[in-house]
Image (cartoon, grey):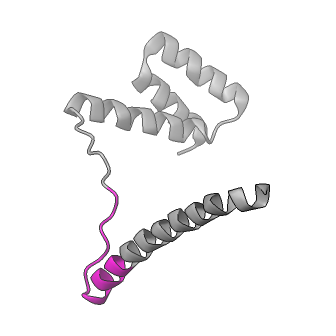
Amino acid sequence: MSRISTIPKHVQAVRVSLRQLDRALAALAALAQEVARGRPAAAPASRKLNLSPARRRALKLQGRYLGYMRQLEPAQKARVRAAKQSKGMRAAIALAKRLAGA
């Protein structure tokens, strides 16, 4: 008797699966039509960063600092970190650049 009672559950599960498959096929068909028309599929929206000029300058400095630090040996990195702490970012970048040989 218990086998018969599970039949409606299985039928319902198949119906749900078929509905999901139908939706997925409809979305795929829409994408295929866009590609056939020569339109690229819409890319997912990415957020636009609104950076202030000061923040942009700071990020450029940080990138320059990290780029030079990547090239240094651990002892040299320690020297550059100490210079950054005492003299600031620009002095640390200049020291790192000199140590890296760039």
Magenta-colored span:
29-44
The count of marks equals 0
Q: Position of residue 63 (x, y in %)?
A: 44, 38
Q: Nearer the viewer, residue 31 or 21?
A: 21
82 displayed left or right of 55: right
Name the residue rendered at 62%, 42% in the picture. 71
Name the residue rendered at 36%, 38% in the picture. 60
Q: Nearer the viewer, residue 35 or 91?
A: 35
Q: Residue 102 lies in magenta, yes or no?
A: no
Name the residue rendered at 50%, 18% in the picture. 84
42 displayed left or right of 66: left
Q: Residue furthest front?
A: 1
Name the residue rendered at 22%, 38% in the picture. 50
Q: Is residue 8 above or below residue 61?
A: below
Q: Residue 41 lies in magenta, yes or no?
A: yes
Q: Position of residue 92 (x, y in %)?
A: 49, 25
Q: Nearer the viewer, residue 6 or 44?
A: 6
Q: Is residue 64 above or below residue 87?
A: below
Q: Position of residue 95 (x, y in %)?
A: 52, 29
Q: Is residue 62 above or below residue 43?
A: above
